[in-house]
Image (cartoon, rainbow, N blue to C red):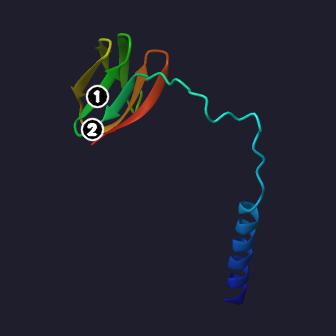
């Protein structure tokens, strides 16, 4: 019991020591600069469906089962959203050659 208390006390002191270290902030950091963020294509799982949104250009999404089998290819026109019905489960969605996302359908 006493050794458990000492262990907990040691861990707490180590956490406090780490949390109080000074962090140097670069003087050249400009917090007033405006940064333009470009929206990207997106995918979202839902209840019995997957929704796809294409931003700026027509986009092809490929939906794969968790085992790697191609389930569906979806072409979404620019600046539109499409939804497909799929059984519940886990899917991997590839957006062209840009990115891949894991999607859960409930």
Alpha carbon distance from label 1 to label 2: 8 Å
Disc 1 marks which residue?
A: 51
Image quadrant assignment for residue 28: top right
Element at badge 1? Answer: strand
Image quarter for residue 86?
top left
Q: Residue at x 50, y 25 (%)?
A: 37
User: Residue at point 33% right, 33% down?
Assistant: 44
- Residue 46 tag number: 2
Residue sitting at x 74%, y 61%: 18
| 2 vs 71: above or below | below
Label 2 near label 1: C-beta < 8 Å?
Answer: yes
Disc 2 residue crowd, few under 14, some 14–19, many 20+, Cα 10 Å = some
From what the image shows, is residue 41 above or below residue 48? above
In the image, residue 73 sits, relative to residue 47, either above or below, namely above
Q: Quadrant of residue 58?
A: top left
21 vs 67, nearest the viewer: 21
Question: Which residue is at the front of the view, 25 or 1?
Answer: 25
Q: Residue furthest bottom?
A: 2
Q: Where in the figure is residue 75, as x and y percent of width and height? A: 31, 13
**19 or 86, which is in the foreground?**
19
Label located before the other in sequence (1 or 2):
2
Does 63 sit left or right of 37 as displayed?
A: left
State the count of labels. Answer: 2
- Residue 32's tag is none
On-image quarter of the C terminus: top left
Q: Is residue 79 left or right of residue 84?
A: right
Residue 72, percent from left and from top: 30, 20
Image position of 43 (left or right of 32): left
Q: Horizontal and vertical percent for residue 66? A: 40, 33
């Amino acid at each position: 019991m006493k050794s458990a208390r000492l262990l907990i006390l040691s861990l707490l002191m180590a956490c406090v020591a780490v949390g109080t270290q000074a962090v140097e902030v670069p003087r050249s950091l400009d917090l007033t600069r405006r940064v333009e963020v470009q929206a990207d294509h997106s995918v979202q799982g839902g209840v019995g469906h997957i929704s796809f949104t294409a931003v700026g250009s027509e986009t092809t999404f490929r939906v794969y089962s968790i085992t790697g089998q191609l389930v569906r290819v979806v072409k979404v026109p620019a600046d539109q959203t499409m939804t497909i019905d799929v059984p519940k489960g886990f899917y991997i969605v590839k957006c062209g050659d840009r990115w891949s996302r894991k999607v859960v359908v409930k």
